[in-house]
Amino acid sequence: MQIQYVQGDCIFTRISPLTKQYEYLTDDIETDVIIVGGGVTGAILGYYFSKRNIKAVLLEKSRIAHGSTSITTSLLQYELDSNAMELKSYTSIANILRSYELGIKALDEIEEFIAEYGNTCDFKRVDSLLYTAKDQEKEEIEQEYKFRKENGFPVEFIDQETNPFSFEVKGGVLSKGGGAQFNPYKYTHALLEVSCKNGLRVYENTEAVDVKYNEKVVTVETVFGHKVRGKVVIVASGYNTHLFTKKVFGTKTTTFNIATRPINNLENIYKGVVVRDNEDPYHYFRTTSDNRIIIGGEDINFLPDILNEELCIKSYDRLEQRLKNLFPKLNIEIEYRYCGAFASTDDNVGFLGKDPKNTKLWYCLGYGANGILFAVLGGMMLSKLYLGEVDEDLKLFEVDRFGS
């Protein structure tokens, strides 16, 4: 059975015009770096490698940015999926703090790309809110606020008396400039446009079906029999990694998203922030440039539950009701419903770097809610690694940090 990692009517591939179609591979070719995966992660890698004048080829099995990229809300926050005190049993406080700092660094990198090449992807740097509506969780949110405040992050604490939002907040951490949002489909194409001018070669509808390694090269065979030979291959295929390894990298769930129709009076009620609550599983929401709200969450087990239509419908319905409860004064009509795989790790960060048993096999897997930010860090650090410069921060993302 072919596992479907994405289901439904994804908003960003629906509302965004197709800017370019890429050819499929029709010859055997050679390069230095083979990137497998044509979503936002592969595009980020293509950008950084081509920026450093490293020859690279990107292979996408179907259409550019139509896999997991199409279902990401692209709600970017420097914080992790869990609060700092919750993560202490899985990693060190120093690692958590550094992860936050690197998240901000990645946000700045995206903003610099937009400043240099133009805002063609509806990018917006915003404040980020983590909140609870429960009295018993207020102390936990206060702890998170103090942790960030004491370590120099620009944050404000919000309670019932200072709450500027229309929904109930018993305790909240407002991170000033700590978030961003954009259209991930447009961002992926913007990256590839720049990268191709720098020498990146992109092939879509070109599935990698086999990979072989020898002492000097790695060879990736594609669906029509043509081969790409390079010095290393980088797995940027999200949750679909079985061609390259039997290793299980994270815990998969199915996460759900719904997007409203444009709302006329949205900005009068919804403050321009990206928001995550403290539920388990949590909910998250953001706006779009054409005044919609996207809300996500209500996670269920990935398999077999993603095949359970009744269960999926209930998740969509709960998201819609939650949105209407949060914003009762808005005229909310749902236009798009979609879901897909989401992978989490114990320490909430992804996997970047070389396979411990194969120096020609590299990974850039942005698991967790910060997947896009981890991919940006991966693009920066892995392109330097190829040139012989080892970034100390790669230790945070080691492929075998949980064992073989």
Image (cartoon, grey):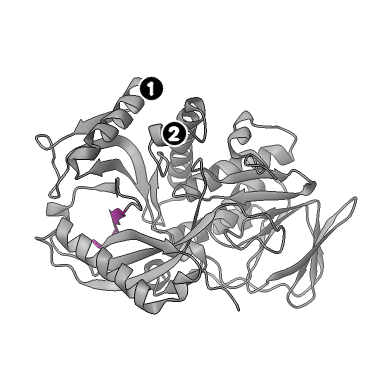
Vertically, is 187 above or below 221? Answer: above
Identified at 22% across, 31% down, the residue is 157
User: Whole-percent x and y of residue 83?
Assistant: 38, 37
Q: Which residue is mark 2?
A: 100
Q: Nearer the viewer, residue 365 or 112?
A: 365
**What type of secondary structure mainly makes up the magenta span?**
loop
**Badge 1 density bin: few <14, some 14–19, many ≥20, Cα 10 Å:** few
Residue 281 inside the magenta-drawn segment: no
Please indicate, yes or no, whether residue 18 appears anywhere in the rendered image.
Answer: no
Mark 2 and mark 1 lie on one chain; the one further toward the N terminus is: 2
Q: Which residue is mark 1?
A: 151
Locate the C terminus and report the quarter of the image it occupies.
top right
Vertically, is 118 above or below 84? Answer: below
Residue at the far right in the pictured view: 215
Identified at 52% across, 47% down, the residue is 345
Q: Nearer the viewer, residue 22 or 262?
A: 262
Secondary structure under the numbered disc 2 in the rendered image:
helix
The reply to whether dot 2 and dot 1 touch (C-beta < 8 Å) is yes
Quadrant assignment, res 28: bottom right
Residue 344 numbered tag: none
Please indicate, yes or no, whether residue 287 appears anywhere in the rendered image.
Answer: yes
- Alpha carbon separation for disc pair 2 and 1: 10 Å
Identified at 51% across, 28% down, the residue is 92
Image: magenta residue range:
283-292
Q: Nearer the viewer, residue 49 or 333?
A: 333
Quadrant assignment, res 142: top left
Amino acid type at image mark 1 = Asn
